[in-house]
Amino acid sequence: MVLHNLLLIFLGLAGGFAVGSGFVAFITVLGIVPRLVQLSKTGKMIHLYEYGIVLGVVLFTWFDLRGWVIEAPVFITAFLGLLTGMFVGMLAAALAEVLNVLPIMVKRLHIQDYLLYILMAMALGKIFGSLFQWLIFQVW
Amino acid sequence: METVIYLRLKKKVLVQCGQLLRLKDICYLVADEKWQYLQDLPIHTVDLAHGNYALIELREVIERIRQHVPQADLRNIGPLQTIVEIMTPIRIPKKLSIVLIWIFLFTGSGLAIMNFHTDVNMKEVHERIYYLVTGEKEKNPLVLQIPYSIGIGVGMILFFNHLFKKRFNEEPSPMELEMFLYQEAIDQFIIDDEKQKAERKDYDGSP
């Protein structure tokens, strides 16, 4: 029994270690935090942001695994939705940027002056795609 | 004594096919009044025989000026070559191609985010968050999902530092920086490539 529990503790720790380090590596490669720091000019606070990420991950994991229900008013979820959506949006933008598709396409097609419209197309496309999925597209 | 002529070649010039390039087209000249006529010195005639890029090296410019002013003291204060890019006519009208690309990216992005949501089972996650926060089960937590959808767009715009014509500050967006680096890499490649071509031509004497 003790041995089982020790093994489970070990497995949990090892799995958590892998997932946690993977998450941090992913966030680092995409460079979302540096981007936010650059926008807000708060380079000195970077450690605070690191703690924010770690705390968020641990807290959300804990709430999810333990099934803790807060029973807060519904409008709180709207607020959460906006924040998580923004994060996913930044993730998507960063991913598109890492893949380096747009600079090449824009150059090939000689539309350097219209980069702005191209970016708007992507942002609006994501909004409408997402809305479409939640409002109309139902296969479940 | 006043024979010092400072040359600064332009990094890159955009020209029409058949255009005769004069010194002032490819180079900034800092010199005495009496040397200003050199500005109109013909250097190079543009043709498409060697592709739509050509390279004018500082060496050629110096030789050309020496022919006219052998005693000139030439000093370079800029790049060692100018890239000449010959404009080729574009077949598809610009407006049309932009509209097409716009629709293409719009639908592509929309589909990609839907794929992502399915891939990570976002619907279930939303239901779970909704339940954990409010304590009620809801199959379609739209109060959460609609702000979430708008948030995606806001996040992307934040990342790219653009809101239609307005930008949040003077810094370049990651995309602009990426385009700049890409262009720099192309320019450097053209310089090396054209030089290599010229050397090969010198070596085996073929045209």
Image: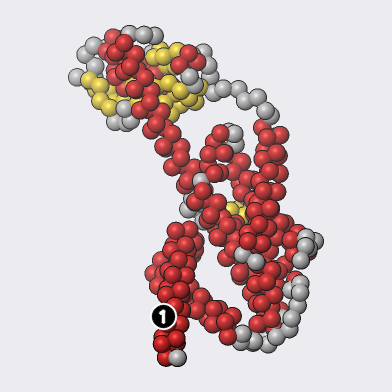
Q: Is residue B74 above or below residue A96?
A: above
Q: Is residue B109 above or below residue B80?
A: below
Q: Is residue B115 above or below residue A57?
A: above
In the image: residue A124, left or right of residue B32: right
Residue for point 61% across, 70% down: A83
Along the line of sight, the residue nearer the viewer: A139 or B200: A139
* Residue A122 picture location, percent across and down: 64, 51
Quarter of image, res B154: bottom right
Q: Is residue B48 above or below residue B146?
A: above
Q: Residues within 10 Å of mark 1 (few under 14, many from 20)?
A: few
Residue sticking out furthest to the bottom: A1
Give the labeled residue for mark 1.
Answer: A10
* Residue B11 picture location, percent across and down: 40, 30
The local secondary structure at tag 1 comes to helix
* Residue B124 picture location, percent across and down: 68, 71
Residue for point 70% across, 83% down: B134
Can residue B20 be seen by looking at this rendering?
Answer: no
* Residue B23 picture location, percent across and down: 39, 18
Residue type highlighted by circle 1: Phe
Quarter of image, res A24: bottom left
Along the line of sight, the residue nearer the viewer: A32 or A136: A136
Residue for point 51% across, 13% down: B18
Can residue B124 be seen by looking at this rendering?
Answer: yes
Give the letter of the chain under mark 1. Answer: A
Q: How is the image coloured?
A: secondary structure
Residue for point 28% across, 9% down: B67
In the image: residue A17, left or right of residue A64: left
In the image: residue A125, left or right of residue B205: right
Quarter holding the N terminus of chain A?
bottom left
Quarter holding the C terminus of chain A?
bottom right
Along the line of sight, the residue nearer the viewer: A116 or B3: A116
